[in-house]
Amino acid sequence: MSDKLDQNEIERLKGLSNKDRYQIPRQTMPEQDPHERRKNFREVPHGLPPMTAVLEANRCIRCKKPGCVQGCPVGIDIPGFVGLVAAGDFLGGIRKMKETNMLPAICGRVCPQEEQCEKVCVTGKKGKPVAIGRLERFVADWEREQGKMETPLVGKPSGKSVGVVGCGPAGLTVAIDLRRAGHAVTIYEALHAPGGVLMYGIPEFRLPKKIVAAEVDVVSRMGVEIRYDYVVGKLETVDDLLKKHDAIFLGTGAGLPWFMGIPGENLCGVYSANEYLTRSNLMRAYDFPNCDTPIARSKRVAVVGGGNVAMDSARTAVRLGAEEVYLVYRRSETEMPARIEEIHHAKEEGIIFKILHNPVRYIGDDKGRVKQVECVRMELGEPDASGRRRPIVVKGSEFLIDVDTVVVAIGNGPNPLVPRTTRGLDVDPKKGTVMTDLNTMRTSKKGVFAGGDIAIGAATVILAMGHGRKAARSINHYLETGVWDIKYLPGEEPKTEQPEAKGQ
Amino acid sequence: MPQQNEVLENTVLAEKVNRYRIFAPEIASHRKAGQFVIIRMDENGERIPLTIADGDAKTGVLTLVVQSVGKSTARMTRLKPGERLLDVVGPLGSPTHIDRFGTVVVIGGGIGIAPAHPIAQALRAAGNKVISILGARTKSLLIMEEDMRRVSDEVVVCTDDGSYGKHGLVTDVLKELIAAQGKPDLVFAIGPVIMMKFVVKLTKEQQIPTLVSLNPIMVDGTGMCGGCRVSVGGETKFACVEGPEFDGLKVDFEELMKRQAFYREQEREAMERFEHECQIGLRV
């Protein structure tokens, strides 16, 4: 399909009935051939061509009660922006998008739309849902490629200032919204680059770093000051920052990698996914020796886990030249937390799925390097606390896989650096998260707000952004009124009073 | 006023050992004994952890003493005053627990004398009797002897080849010291892993509490990657946040040495390439 806009076609599509719209198949996004992309770090999907985007947008029937908007953690006016794309007005589409989401090129790529907006899409009830995520990505890419990225207006200076700890999705969102309200904002970032997990965690082939840089650049142009290499808790504490700012937002993420605590986990070649991905993404070890940071030159890799981070690690290993990459997951594929698209891409790239398997120990050579992983087979029993069927070890099923690298991708806990160094900040003793009222994003410490993974444990980019948005509203309210002890933000009280629970 | 991260001075202290004075006022004023920084030379540079030798809150000057062991540290030796490091992050790690222990023997081996300096300084300020043992392979490699004399009650120097001070290893000196003066209340050992391992072997026999400062491979330095994990008393610790100082009697030094050697092949390649680029004039 041509890159040019076909006005006649746009006019024709305008006249379609809903019945006609249901007949349009969901448009596919062209992507790199799996054999080719195994050898490079370039982005896998190419994005929709303009007229394909117009056609896809015309699948939306603009229902009266759009569930998709409710399904979106940041409440994007989805029918609004999709309608403008359908009419070929891409500039209008991106402007509509940016009323609620300033990081659409990122969200369009990494949001689990199939679990959110697209899950409740009415068109999806009869066939496949409108490809909202692909359209979001389309308008964002269109704007950037046209060189037309607009800097949103900032509010009149309020005289107040807010310190944001962590430059990830939560921190960036809160910073944008606070600048719109006219507050001065400084982001304190521990690493040398912005973006948090967008930069160190998510690989280039899924989220090109120049796209993160471009969206962060807009944040800088809004007048947000970003202080890199600034480790809050070590250089200055949150208590110190409270002397410089009127409020603090904590968006420090889930940066603490979990290990399983099985024998051999400290052998050379056993990585946390955080380390493996940080070396490859943030430090660009895939370009060694042009870049100085090394990474294992692996032939046979086992990645442990079944989430998106496990998929990212396995797909990174393939691109770094590994010949065989195993994905070892203790439950079945149905229970995998990874997005279906990521699982599909991983399989296409030749990752060998060892589902219902679990590592029990790693065996090293005389140099202390991992050479084998001992696994057991698992079967599914009764549902556990998570509602998923509990994996049980099959007795006597031990066997060995030869590997030279292992990547442990079983999850991350909240980074303890800030919680440990802040006075009067309540922390969940079990999870290590900062106790945060999710209605107001307020913590136990006056003037300190939190959101994203530090508040709820490892979750998604878009949930962190939703928290950032809510926290910004809450911070605005606090800075205007000075009132700290509230249960709900004005206008967000529950519609019906919950009756008091009796006799319990 | 110098720029942030500007190199104010680069002095050769010994063969392959340089002292850098960097303008980093926030770190210089917040750092405590036992902490370290991570630096990055340029956009393609790796993040390398370096111990802090000194920091002056008044002038904002941070002092690093660095041994050239690989490409990044070799590149540092070419830094000229006025040039800037791209990133200096810190202070990282937990500060040394300073208390009034009594008599403390501070052992610095080779480049380890540099991080031993602020620790000896702080221990003495807290009212301890500080006896420092400085070890080097040979006389020309010995650094900071004068600095250490200023912060110690007593200093014993030894060299492996006998070219200066006592002929022998730091463990020989420690043995003699114990024989002459009795057991100290605490031993602090910083230096090559092999040196710390042998110091601990001795202090374990003598049941002397011993702290060591470890320098495993790390990336972020904030507890995020876990690359720096070390086994201490059978438990896994992240040296960047829970260390870098640990109870030496419990550290698995064998594992640490193996983990430190993991990227040796790549390190050699990077170094060879760098030297080649220098030779053919690609780097000036």
Image: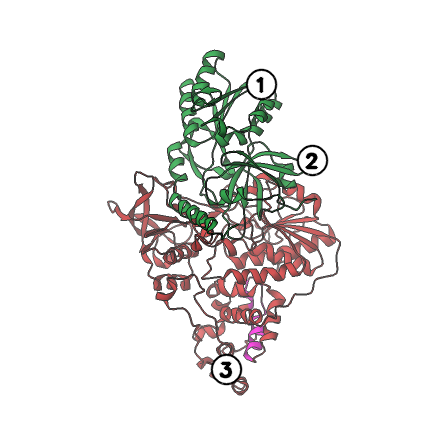
Q: Is residue B223 visible?
A: no
Chain of the residue where label 1 is placed in the rendered structure:
B
Q: Quadrant of residue B13?
A: top right
Q: Is residue B128 magenta?
A: no
Chain of the residue where label 3 is placed in the rendered structure:
A
**Residue B58, label in figure:** 2
Q: What is the CA distance from the residue labelled 3 to the residue labelled 1?
A: 90 Å
Q: Quadrant of residue A86?
A: bottom right
Q: Residue at x 46, y 62 (%)?
A: A206
Q: Is residue B180 above or below residue B219?
A: above
Q: Amino acid at mark 3?
A: Asn
Chain of the residue where label 2 is placed in the rendered structure:
B
Indicate the position of residue B235 as horizontal and vertical percent values. 42, 34
Q: Residues within 10 Å of mark 1 (few under 14, many from 20)?
A: some
| Residue that carries the numbered disc 1 in the rendered image | B153
Q: Both on one chain, marks 2 and 1?
A: yes
- Judged from the image, the secondary structure of the residue bearing numbered disc 2 is loop
Q: Amino acid at mark 1?
A: Asp
- Judged from the image, the secondary structure of the residue bearing numbered disc 1 is loop
Q: In the figure, the red chain has which letter?
A: A
Residue ranking furthest to the front = B280
Q: Both on one chain, marks 3 and 2?
A: no
Q: Amino acid at mark 2?
A: Lys
Q: Residue at x 40, y 23 (%)?
A: B201
